[in-house]
Structures are given as C-alpha cells and as structure tokens.
C-alpha cells in the first residue's frame, strides 16, 4: 500500500473545504466588485446630468459644436488662466467627434465616462500584476473604493479638460509597468503619447514627463527608441496646425511671468499642489462636491415631497 502516494480522508476534506472557501471568496469578490463599479457608474451619470456649466465647459462645447456643425475645427484648446490657450485640437475633437455620431449633448459626456472606465481597467490591470495571492483581490477592492468611488473623481464627471487626464495618467502608469518587463515599440509609443496628449488638455503635463525622465534615469524601464521617436513624430504632426495658427493669431498666446517649473520655486503653488494631492486622493471633500452640482431632480420625487 502506497502511503505516500495517496491522500488520507482528512487531507481530502481539508483540500475540499479550501477549494470551497476559495470559490466562495471568488464569487463574493466578483459580486462586490461589480456592485461597486455599477454604483460608481451610476453616480457618474448623476453628476454628469446635474453639472453646472461654467466658462471651461462652455469653451469646450463651443469648439466642439463649431467643428461638428460648421466643420471649423479650431487648432487650440481652452484658454488657461495665465499662459494662453492650451496647444492642439484634442479638446475640440473630444467634443465634436461624438457629436458627428450622435447629435446630442450626451454624446461627448458618454465618451468621457467611457474613457474614465478605460482608465479604471488599465489601473486595475496594474494592481492585478502588482499583488499576488489572496492580497490581490483585497487590493483591487480597496483601489475600486479609493479611485472609482472617490467623491472627487465622481464630481469630475463633467466636460472639463482635467476630467480627461485620468485616462492619460492611467496609460502612463500602465505602459511604464509593462516597460519594466521588456522593450516594446507599442508600450513605449503609448507611454510617450500619453504625455503628449495630456499636454493638449492641461498644463500639468510636465508631471508625467518628469516621472518618465526619472524612470529612465533610474533605468527602471526598457525603452524602445523607435517607439519613442514614432510617438514624438505623431505628436508633432498633430501640433502643426496649432503652430500655423500661433504664427498668425497672437490672441492664443499670452504674455505671462509664468514658466515651466514656476511652481517649484514659489511657495504657494507647491503648498497648494500638496494640499490638492492629499485632498483629491482622500475620501474627504468640501461642500463644493455638493454645492456646485445641481440636484433639483430630488425635488421632483413625489414621496420626498410628502415626507419633507
């Protein structure tokens, strides 16, 4: 009788119980993750429906509708507070292109929410590849709560340049983790492209560029120089219309004492950035999240009128 080759009844029971627990944990994780995702998705649409239009949103909508309705695609983005308009026409196409498919104010909003879902998928993939074993599912659930269900993230479900940055930040991180494993044209292309596309939306893009330079300096990734050059060429080609517009339209360039790195040598911008970093990354929020969103639809619910 082979005592070493056969499992005892007690061992078989333990293994069976372990498999049963793992199966239950897997089902519970899938249920909780799906529930959390759907709750966040629902709030995205609620905030989108009740967003207040300010100057930034109006600028984007005007450029998008001008392109979709009159085929005039402006080659510059929103006017920044200090240094002129953001370069490139990406913000125009993010609004105008969906309108060509579905002529509704909801079409660019649906695209924005889809891009934010893509950012979640990319970042979730990073979490899955970073953690192992039983800690992986817990880490994914925690990240879902801290990112997808973050009140600041949900409040940002509005047509505003920074609302799109989560996608490019996710592309940047995801491609960086892939580049740690091997040199790849595709991953390097996406990595560089994420920095350039962020540049066409917001002047905070140097943060991603500095991170990339640091990773390269520390030799923490394998760079495909062909992929990097191809991405730079694509970005420069996309900016040619902007440079042509800049040569004849001085209004999109504004004289300012600001420069790249301004915040590093002045106390207030650095302090403000640190406070924002702590605030946006937390579940703490001010009344801005509620007070700056219109919730008049609540007053239309009959049973609330009766109980009020």
Image (cartoon, rainbow, N blue to C red):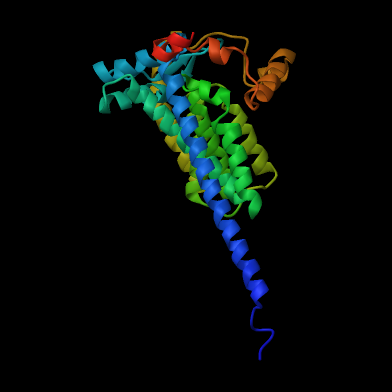
What is the x, y in percent for residue 198? 51, 28
Tell me: residue 156, above or below residue 252.
below
Query: Nearest the camera: 95 or 216?
Result: 95
Decide if residue 92 is on the left or right side of residue 175: left
Residue nearest the observer in this picture, 229 or 301 = 301
State whether residue 242 is above or below residue 4.
above
| Quarter of the image where one finds residue 88 | top left
Q: Residue at x 62, y 62 (%)?
A: 18
Which residue is farthest front?
A: 306
Q: Position of residue 174 (x, y in %)?
A: 55, 43
Picture layout, residue 36 above or below residue 133: above
* Residue 65, picture quadrant: top left
Q: Position of residue 247 (x, y in %)?
A: 42, 15
**Residue 132 visible in the current orientation:** no
Q: Is residue 279 left or right of residue 188?
A: right
Q: Is residue 74 left or right of residue 4?
A: left
Q: Residue at x 28, y 20 (%)?
A: 68
- Residue at image x 58%, y 49%? 128
14, above or below 97, in the image: below
Residue situated in front as seen by the camera: 156 or 307? 307
Task: Measuring from the top left, give residue 139's x and y in whole percent.
Answer: 63, 44
240 left or right of 33 in image:
left
Quarter of the image with the N terminus in it: bottom right
């Amino acid at each position: 009788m082979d005592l070493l080759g056969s499992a005892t009844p007690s061992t078989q029971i333990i293994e069976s119980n372990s498999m049963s627990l793992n199966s239950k944990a897997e089902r519970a994780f899938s249920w909780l993750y799906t529930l959390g995702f759907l709750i966040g998705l629902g709030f995205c649409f609620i905030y989108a429906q009740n967003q207040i239009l300010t100057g930034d949103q109006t600028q984007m909508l005007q450029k998008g509708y001008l392109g979709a309705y009159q085929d005039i695609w402006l080659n510059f983005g929103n006017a920044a507070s200090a240094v002129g308009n953001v370069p490139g026409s990406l913000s125009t196409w993010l609004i105008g292109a969906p309108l060509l498919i579905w002529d509704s104010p909801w079409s660019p909003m649906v695209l924005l929410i889809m891009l934010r879902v893509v950012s979640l998928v990319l970042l979730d993939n990073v979490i899955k590849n970073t953690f192992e074993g039983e800690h992986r599912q817990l880490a994914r659930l925690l990240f879902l709560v801290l990112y997808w269900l973050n009140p600041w993230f949900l409040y940002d479900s509005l047509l505003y340049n920074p609302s799109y940055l989560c996608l490019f930040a996710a592309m940047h991180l995801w491609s960086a983790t892939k580049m740690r494993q091997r040199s790849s044209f595709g991953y390097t292309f996406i990595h560089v492209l994420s920095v350039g596309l962020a540049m066409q939306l917001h002047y905070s893009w140097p943060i991603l560029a500095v991170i990339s330079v640091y990773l390269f300096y520390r030799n923490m990734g394998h760079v495909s120089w062909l992929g990097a050059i191809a991405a730079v060429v694509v970005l420069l080609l996309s900016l040619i219309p902007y440079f042509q517009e800049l040569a004849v339209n001085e209004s999109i360039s504004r004289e300012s004492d600001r420069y790249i790195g301004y915040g590093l040598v002045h106390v207030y911008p650095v302090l403000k950035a640190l406070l924002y970093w702590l605030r946006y990354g937390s579940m703490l929020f001010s009344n801005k999240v509620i007070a700056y969103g219109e919730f008049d639809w609540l007053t239309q619910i009959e049973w609330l009128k009766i109980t009020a």
